[in-house]
């Protein structure tokens, strides 16, 4: 081809510096390095605990084995199994009803059965105990009605393992419900029709086709329930039912046996990691199972006769027990408490608790979202150079979600205590410091640190998803259209990641609002949140006073559930 | 007259040498198609022209502007180039009209409005201005991407495999539409594709690349009929390659004593024959046997086994009666292209 240039302004071709400069290397590695640093900071508390197991204190374990350990483990196992079975039956059953059948109210139940997700277990717990205990309205009514006395009748004891399992099942079944419902929905009509053609009836089709196909997602749901049960502190502590998670708080906070608490916490870390790992594997499997997602959805079978009312009744009872009853009861108590403000011993400064809660929620959400943004952008795979970046790196920062709050709190304290000690020593030596305060322990800083470790996953999941919406070619297109870096940020990035940031912030905010064990262990002295107040008041039996903060938490908790419903309806 | 000039450009991604010593001139107001298989460096070349990638060495001129090389560097933002991407890269949060006016921020509202109307008319999307990208079909999104790129009246427009995500029949219509729109706009166009048919159909000037190297440039019919290398010939068409011995402007092969297109050639060569240039007639003393026919409706491709066992393919009118196992005598109508064979 002709290589002569028709243009006159031909310049001398200057020899170019082609030796590799250090800058592109830094640019390529800056992101991963940032992510690794943040991961270290976020995993430090848990890592410290895991390391405790290396320098295992056998005497301590032997002592615990002779005292609390067998019963605690037995309790934990019994609770986990009970709740897993309960949520499995209730969650899968209701999910199958609303996806496979048409009956009165189905459309409403389809959405509303998610609502109990908004209720923290400890609130459901104290509502149920207060309603169904001996002095509660139900038993009082029965006694008045039939003129029974104590011991004249049998009534199930709500303050028992059975009651606890019931309460946690009502709170946690939505996990199984949501996941198995979406699994059933994805099943193509063809698959189920094939079973029908082969002569399978309704029940065999469910048992031998639909259920096995949905198994991976159901398993993920049950696993999430198991994690939540293991990490629960508020409910078990209200029921006075010692589990691993509850013991850690008690050992640390009441018995001041930090050594034993730390050992138990390190055991929990290993346990939680195992569950988390299992969940990852199950999710990966779930992807392979979803092969029938194309094609027609299965058509719902319209129920006739008494069966349709039975279906409505089942869903209605479930929704009533898991949502309507607690909300109604809390509303009644709150109204009563507002109308007779002087009747209780404590005059509650709810404004302060609300303010504390909102402040902690906002600060926690801010930092969590900020770190999530840095991680999401640092690990972005937007150029050929960064295409090979591993996804698991960013995922590492989210392990905290599988950990009980108590474990994270203990972890944060084991990290923060030595720093405080050193700083205080230094201050005493150099400045003749006389005070009692520490730099980090018992301050908002360690509290926020704990929240960030625990709730990172909520912010990162929604933000990373929205950052991925900004495809590299969109930026390239904007640049060819004359937009500079600043304009690309304002005109492309901000509008596209705004909702992701918002959703992440709301999720973190609401979960901080509901949070108990981290707050209890790490809060500055005298700083009460709505959740702490609701918990303490309910433990002490002031259920009417507890109802107001509980209801506020519940209402806030509805926001993310509505967000979830929105996502669900967009998928349809 | 050339409008874009690329001189001795090299581009590395880590250890991968994506574009090697590239010299290329791109004509004004014409469609130049960069053709090659994936990883041949064609998309990198396009991104180098756009200013989305910086070459490791070499110079690029666009119009009378020296945009890259030495200490000169103009980024994509400053180059005033329109680009259409394989995945369209429409802004999902903006409507069709807002996507089109994205690059027109400096113009007044009324200018933006009339320009949008003109472009929607040009690409045939009138009345769609308030839709969002996700409400459009693939072909419609493609048209919006083209309108958006044309909106600021760029002197150069770059298209990176724009039709690869469309189904076959839509691709056909889009190809004709885009060719018409680009010629009407008289814009200098660089079009990247891996589809030979598309390249031949669209190109005023065809550029074939392979392994980061430029292999051949020229008008499509020239490149097709007179490839300058065996790999270009094999990439552009399903050619038959038979060994031969060249001397005095002719070449001896199993297909006969053929006249050479490059008569200077001599010695052992590889001869390229197109299926459509091979004819044959029934002949019991012929040099080949029919082994298979493939019927395409408007033509058929017949496999002929030569005495050496090599199979060549001939394309014929579909109404020619053919019997499998029949002996035939082949004939090659036109001078053939051949390349020296190095053992």
Image (cartoon, coloured by chain):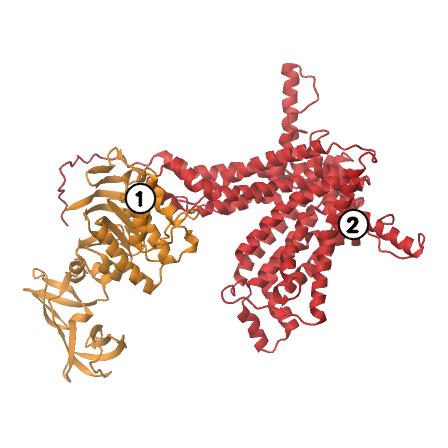
Chain colours: A red, B orange
From what the image shows, is residue A241 above or below residue A210? Answer: above
Q: Is residue A258 visible?
A: yes
Figure label count: 2
Task: Report which residue position mark 2 lands on.
Answer: A128
Q: Which one is in front in this view, the residue at disc 1 or the one at disc 2?
A: 2
Task: Report which residue position mark 1 lands on.
Answer: B12
From what the image shows, is residue B35 above or below residue B51? Answer: below
From what the image shows, is residue B6 above or below residue B162? Answer: above
Q: In x, y percent, where is residue A455?
A: 60, 42
Residue pictured at 81% horizontal, 49% vertical:
A131
In the visual, does A482 lie left or right of A268? left
In the visual, does A288 lie left or right of B118? right
Q: Residues within 10 Å of mark 1 (few under 14, many from 20)?
A: some
For numbered disc 2, what is the local secondary structure? helix
Residue lying at the far left of the rendered structure: B248
**What chain does mark 2 sit on?**
A
In the visual, does A568 lie left or right of B330? right
Q: In x, y percent, where is residue A242?
A: 77, 45
Q: In which quarter of the image is residue A347?
A: top right
The front one of A70 and B102 is B102
From what the image shows, is residue B158 above or below residue A11? Answer: below
Give how far apart the Cα atoms at labels 1 and 2 are. Answer: 68 Å
Q: Can residue A265 be seen in this view?
A: no
């Amino acid at each position: 081809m002709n290589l002569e240039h028709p243009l006159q302004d031909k310049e001398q071709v200057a020899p170019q510096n082609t030796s590799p400069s250090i800058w592109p290397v830094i640019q390529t590695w800056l992101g991963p390095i940032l992510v690794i640093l943040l991961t270290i900071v976020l995993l430090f508390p848990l890592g410290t605990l895991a390391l405790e197991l290396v320098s295992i204190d056998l005497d301590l374990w032997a002592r615990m084995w002779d005292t609390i350990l067998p019963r605690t483990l037995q309790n934990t196992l019994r609770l986990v199994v009970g709740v897993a079975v309960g949520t499995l039956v209730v969650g899968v059953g209701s999910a199958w009803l609303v996806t496979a059948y048409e009956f009165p109210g189905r459309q409403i139940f389809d959405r509303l059965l998610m609502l109990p997700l908004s209720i923290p277990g400890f609130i459901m717990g104290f509502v149920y105990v207060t309603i169904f205990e001996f002095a509660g309205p139900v038993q009082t009514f029965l006694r008045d009605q039939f003129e029974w006395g104590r011991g004249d009748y049998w009534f199930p004891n709500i303050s028992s393992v059975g009651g606890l399992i019931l309460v946690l099942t009502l709170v946690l079944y939505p996990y199984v419900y949501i996941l198995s419902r979406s699994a059933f929905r994805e099943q193509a009509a063809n698959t189920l029709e094939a079973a029908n053609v082969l002569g399978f009836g309704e029940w065999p089709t469910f048992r031998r086709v639909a259920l096995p196909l949905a198994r991976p997602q159901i398993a993920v749901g049950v696993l999430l329930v198991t994690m939540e049960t293991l990490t629960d502190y508020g409910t078990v502590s209200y029921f006075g039912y010692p589990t691993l998670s509850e013991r850690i708080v008690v050992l640390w906070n009441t018995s001041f046996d930090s050594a034993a608490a730390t050992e138990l916490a390190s055991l929990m870390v290993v346990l939680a990691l195992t569950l988390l790992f299992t969940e990852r594997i199950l999710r990966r499997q779930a992807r392979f199972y979803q092969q029938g997602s194309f094609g027609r959805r299965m058509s719902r079978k319209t129920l006739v006769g008494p069966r349709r009312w039975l279906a409505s009744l089942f869903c209605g009872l479930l929704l009533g027990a898991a949502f309507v009853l607690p909300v109604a009861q809390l509303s009644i108590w709150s109204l009563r408490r507002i109308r007779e403000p002087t009747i209780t011993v404590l005059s509650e400064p709810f404004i302060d608790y609300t303010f504390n809660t909102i402040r902690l929620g906002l600060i926690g959400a801010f930092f969590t979202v900020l770190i999530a943004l840095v991680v999401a952008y640092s690990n972005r795979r937007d150029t050929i150079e960064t295409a090979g970046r591993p996804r698991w790196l960013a995922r590492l920062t989210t392990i905290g979600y599988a950990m009980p709050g108590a474990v994270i709190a203990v972890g944060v304290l084991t990290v923060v205590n030595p720093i405080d000690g050193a700083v205080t020593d230094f201050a005493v030596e150099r400045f003749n410091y006389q005070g009692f305060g520490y730099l980090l322990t018992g301050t908002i800083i360690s509290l926020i640190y704990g929240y960030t470790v625990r709730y990172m996953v909520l912010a990162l999941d929604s933000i990373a998803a929205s950052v991925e919406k900004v495809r590299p070619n969109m930026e390239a297109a904007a640049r060819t259209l004359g937009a500079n870096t600043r304009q690309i940020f304002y005109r492309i990035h901000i509008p596209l990641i705004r909702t992701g940031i918002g959703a992440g912030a709301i999720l973190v905010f609401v979960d901080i609002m509901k949070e108990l064990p981290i707050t209890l262990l790490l809060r500055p002295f005298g700083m009460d949140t709505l959740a702490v107040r609701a918990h303490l008041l309910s433990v002490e039996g002031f259920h009417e006073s507890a109802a107001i903060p509980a209801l506020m938490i519940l209402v806030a908790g509805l926001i993310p559930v509505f967000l979830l419903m929105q996502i669900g309806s967009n998928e349809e | 007259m050339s409008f874009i000039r690329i001189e001795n450009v090299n581009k590395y991604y880590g250890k991968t040498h994506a574009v090697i010593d590239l010299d290329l001139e791109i004509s004004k107001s014409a469609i130049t198609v960069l053709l090659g298989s994936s990883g041949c460096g064609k998309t990198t070349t396009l991104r180098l022209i756009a200013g989305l990638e910086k070459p490791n060495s070499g110079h690029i001129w666009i119009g009378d502007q020296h945009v890259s090389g030495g200490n000169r560097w103009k980024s994509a933002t400053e180059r005033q180039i329109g680009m259409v991407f394989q995945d369209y890269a429409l802004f999902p949060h903006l409507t069709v009209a807002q996507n089109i006016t994205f690059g027109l921020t400096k113009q007044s509202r009324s200018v933006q409005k009339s320009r949008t109307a003109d472009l929607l008319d040009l690409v045939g999307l009138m009345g769609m201005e308030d839709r969002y990208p996700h409400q459009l079909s693939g072909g419609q999104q493609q048209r919006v991407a083209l309108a958006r790129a044309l909106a600021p009246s760029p002197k150069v427009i770059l298209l990176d495999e724009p039709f690869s995500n469309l189904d076959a029949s839509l691709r056909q219509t889009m190809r004709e539409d885009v060719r018409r729109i680009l010629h009407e706009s008289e814009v200098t166009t660089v079009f990247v594709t891996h589809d030979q048919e598309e390249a031949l159909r669209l190109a005023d000037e065809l550029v074939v690349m392979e392994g980061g190297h430029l292999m051949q440039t020229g008008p499509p019919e020239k490149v097709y009929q007179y490839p300058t290398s065996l790999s270009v010939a094999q990439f552009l068409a399903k050619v038959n390659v038979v060994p031969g011995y060249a001397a005095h402007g002719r070449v001896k092969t199993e297909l006969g004593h053929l006249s050479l297109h490059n008569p200077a050639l001599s010695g052992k060569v590889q001869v390229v024959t197109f299926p459509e240039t091979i004819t044959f007639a029934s002949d019991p003393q012929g040099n080949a046997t029919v082994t298979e026919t493939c019927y395409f409706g408007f033509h058929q491709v017949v496999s002929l086994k030569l005495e050496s066992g090599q199979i060549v393919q001939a394309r014929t009118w579909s109404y020619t009666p053919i019997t499998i196992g029949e002996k035939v005598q082949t004939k090659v109508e036109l001078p053939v292209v051949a390349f020296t064979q190095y053992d």
